Image (tube, rainbow, N blue to C red):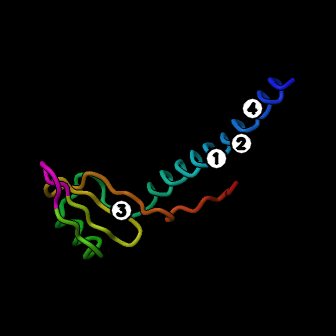
Amino acid sequence: MTRIVLALGLAILTGFSGFGVLSADVLLIEEVRQASTMDVPPNGMSTADVRARFGEPETVHAAVGDPPITRWDYGQWSVYFEYDLVLFTVLHKGVVKDKNPG
């Protein structure tokens, strides 16, 4: 009897934790979709072109490592450069809103 109650309790807890993972996956998918529709610097764009198109960043972080990686922060996203070229752009937390909180 105790084993059945323990197994049932474990199954319930496992099931509830799955909802959190599912919600996170949905939010990640939504973030990828929204990022693809936003006007952000594409991979390979130069620092000069980023400045010309998007203006001055709010913050410029010093280069780190070898090869040097630099980060520029804008209002809703940050852009990472290797030398003078965009590696990738990352949306800031909270830019994408979960449409189905749960």
Place of residue 40 in the rendered image (x, y in percent of width and height, measured from the top left): 35, 62
Residue in the image at 42% along x and 63% along y: 92
Asked if residue 14 is positioned above or below residue 19 in the image, the reply reads above
Viewer-proximal residue among 72 and 47: 72
Q: Is 72 within the magenta?
A: no
Magenta residues, as a range? 63-69
For image coordinates 71% across by 42% down, the residue present is: 16
**CB-based contact (under 8 Å), mark 4 and mark 2:** no
Nearest the viewer among 96 and 60 is 60
Q: CA distance from mark 4 to mark 2?
A: 9 Å
Q: Secondary structure at mark 4?
A: helix
Residue in the picture at 20% in, 60% down: 70
Ranked by sequence position, the earlier of labels 3 and 4 is 4
Q: Name the image quarter holding residue 3.
A: top right
Residue 10, percent across and down?
73, 32
Instruction: Give the CA distance from mark 1 to mark 2.
Output: 7 Å
Instruction: Give the residue at mark 2.
Output: 16
Question: If you read the primary sequence from the N terminus, does the residue marked by circle 4 or circle 1 appear first?
Answer: 4
Q: Residue furthest front?
A: 2
Q: Amino acid at mark 1?
A: Gly
Residue 20, which numbered label? 1
**Three-letter amino acid code at the position of disc 2:** Phe
Can you tell which of label 2 and label 3 is closer to the viewer? 2
Say which residue label 3 marks.
40
Label 2: element kind:
helix
- Amino acid at circle 3: Val
Mark found first going from the N terminus, 4 or 2: 4
Q: What quarter of the picture does the C terminus occupy?
A: bottom right
